Image (cartoon, rainbow, N blue to C red):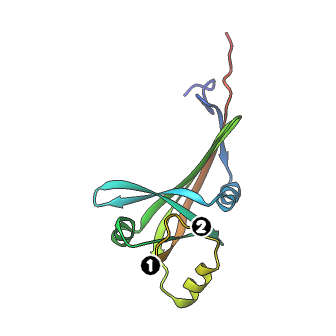
Amino acid sequence: MSDELNGWSPRGPVTELSEADCWSLLAANTFGRLGLIDGDRPDIFPIYYQTDGGSIVFRTGTGTKSRELLENGSVVLEIDEVAEHGSWSVVLRGAAEFLTAPEEIEAADLLALPDWIPVTTYAYVRIRPSAVRGRRFLRHVHVGR
């Protein structure tokens, strides 16, 4: 890639976010998209989550998402925002596990997790990250001759 295009995108310059900046954005938001694998095909689900130390916690009812999590705990969580002067995206990859210890469930009950769809039976899931990456995109294009 030529130096002229290095760090440029159609939306403007791209800046890699630090891991601390990524976690700040994850902590400041509660809605994301969870990517899972169902057999040999990808799947994606909207979720509400909370950060909990260096991990992500969300709850889910029984169904497709729970089944896929039990079959393959490798997940990806993506959050983003588009604003007037730019946008950002954070992607967290990791391993998901259902919380089963009573003390973990009690602690998860104290997290401010919004209801996506109210259900009477649900389980808590924790994502332990293996990688967190984020980018900021400035919205401007250089015009020149």
Mark sitting on residue 121:
1
Q: Amino acid at mark 2?
A: Pro
- Looking at the picture, tell me which residue is in the foreground, 9 or 77: 77
Q: Secondary structure at mark 1?
A: loop
Horizontal and vertical percent for residue 108?
A: 59, 79
- In this view of the protein, which residue sits in the foreground, 22 or 69? 69
**Which residue is at a point 32% across and 60% down the rendered structure image?**
38
Would residue 64 appear left or right of 17 to someone viewing this image?
A: left
Q: Residue at x 36, y 54 (%)?
A: 42
Say which residue appears at 47% left-offset and 85% top-offset: 100
The tally of labels here is: 2
Q: Disc 1 marks which amino acid?
A: Thr
Q: Quadrant of the C terminus?
A: top right
Q: CA distance from mark 1 to mark 2?
A: 15 Å
Query: Residue placed at 71% from the left, 34% from the top?
Result: 85
75 vs 56, left or right, is: left
Quarter where residue 106 is shown: bottom right
Q: Quadrant of residue 49?
A: bottom right
Q: Residue furthest top?
A: 145
In the image, residue 91 above or below residue 108:
above
Image quadrant holding the N terminus, namely: top right
Locate residue 35, reporting x and y percent. 44, 57
Give the numbered dot on residue 114.
2
102 or 10, which is in the foreground?
A: 102
Q: Position of residue 48 (x, y in %)?
A: 56, 63
